[in-house]
Image: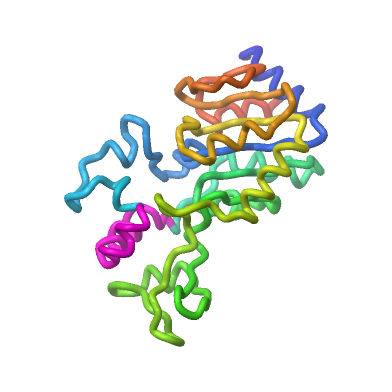
């Protein structure tokens, strides 16, 4: 077995406070495509005539709302996706009494589906939607069942997914929770992310310990000193750790 995996296993056992900082690669085994890999969404030819990255911007949502929702419902709302072993293992650690905070850049809600309670969703969730006019909340099913642009039943206002689009700031309260969790942790596991998206990539600067492990298929660029990097599937790595 990989020595780094053994070291990570021991680090998890010994840690008092763990932060798992995850990106799109955590959910690829659940059938949800990532964004920046060779097969990722941003590298596919768009069927809408615009780059998919542009279609996830606030300005596109405002100026092309109908097309935004066609794209959003087709590519972003994977309601039937199920947690993979990575999600399940992290939930298991929490149930076993480990003090673990999950900071995720994903909006798929799979950590919550797996049973994790202490989850910070940096970019929001497809399961939360709200009216921009009166603030009324709506379910994902309401969005999916809307024929065109989903509008509020109460006031007729436009409904927006509670997800952070490009050109939008991250929620301040969410950011504060993430910063506190990172600053208090003694083990940081970075997984399934290229650390290329600002400001999420700057968050790891608030981890002041020296116990950092990376699990990602591709090597990542970070000036932080790491204890070990495992370039493999995240679920597979956790399956090996769980079997020890």
- Most common secondary structure along the magenta stretch: helix
Residue at 66% across / 52% down in the picture?
Answer: 115
Q: Nearer the viewer, residue 205 or 195?
A: 205
Residue found at the far bottom of this picture: 154
Say if residue 29 shows up in the picture.
Answer: no
Q: In which quarter of the image is the C terminus?
A: top right
Q: Position of residue 213 (x, y in %)?
A: 64, 24
Q: Which of 242 and 184 is in front in this view?
A: 184
Say if residue 39 shows up in the picture.
Answer: yes
Q: Please tell me whether residue 66 belongs to the stretch shown in magenta.
A: yes
Q: Is residue 168 above or below residue 242?
A: below
Q: In which quarter of the image is the N terminus?
A: top right
Residue at 49% across / 62% down in the picture?
Answer: 162
Q: Position of residue 53 (x, y in %)?
A: 32, 45
Q: Position of residue 238 (x, y in %)?
A: 62, 30
- Which segment did they paint magenta? 57-78
Q: Is residue 4 above or below residue 184?
A: above
Q: Which colour scheme is used?
A: rainbow
Residue at 54% across / 54% down in the picture?
Answer: 109
Q: Please tell me whether residue 222 belongs to the stretch shown in magenta.
A: no
Residue 182 is left or right of residue 238, and the answer is right
Residue 64 is left or right of residue 5, and the answer is left
Count of numbered circles in the view: 0
Residue at 48% across / 20% down in the picture?
Answer: 219
Q: Position of residue 228 (x, y in %)?
A: 63, 17
């Amino acid at each position: 077995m990989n020595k780094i995996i053994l070291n990570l296993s021991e680090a998890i056992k010994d840690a008092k406070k763990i932060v798992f900082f995850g990106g799109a690669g955590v959910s690829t085994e659940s059938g949800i495509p990532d964004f920046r890999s060779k097969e990722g969404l941003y590298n596919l030819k768009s069927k809408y005539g615009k780059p998919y990255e542009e279609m996830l911007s606030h300005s596109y949502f405002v100026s092309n709302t109908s097309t935004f929702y066609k794209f959003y419902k087709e590519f972003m709302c994977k309601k039937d996706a199920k947690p993979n072993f990575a999600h399940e293992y992290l939930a298991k650690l929490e149930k076993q009494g480990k003090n673990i905070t999950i900071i995720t850049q994903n909006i798929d809600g799979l950590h919550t589906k797996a049973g994790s309670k202490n989850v910070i969703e940096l970019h929001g969730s497809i399961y939360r939607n709200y009216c921009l006019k009166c603030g009324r909340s709506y379910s994902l099913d309401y969005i999916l069942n809307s024929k065109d642009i989903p509008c509020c039943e109460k006031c007729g206002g436009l409904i927006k997914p509670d997800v952070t689009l490009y050109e939008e700031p991250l929620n301040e309260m969410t950011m504060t929770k993430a910063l506190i969790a990172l600053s208090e942790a003694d083990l940081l596991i970075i997984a399934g992310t290229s650390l290329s998206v600002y400001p999420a990539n700057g968050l790891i600067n608030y981890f002041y310990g020296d116990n950092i492990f990376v699990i990602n298929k591709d090597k990542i660029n970070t000036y932080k000193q790491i204890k070990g990097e495992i370039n493999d599937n995240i679920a597979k790595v956790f399956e090996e750790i769980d079997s020890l």
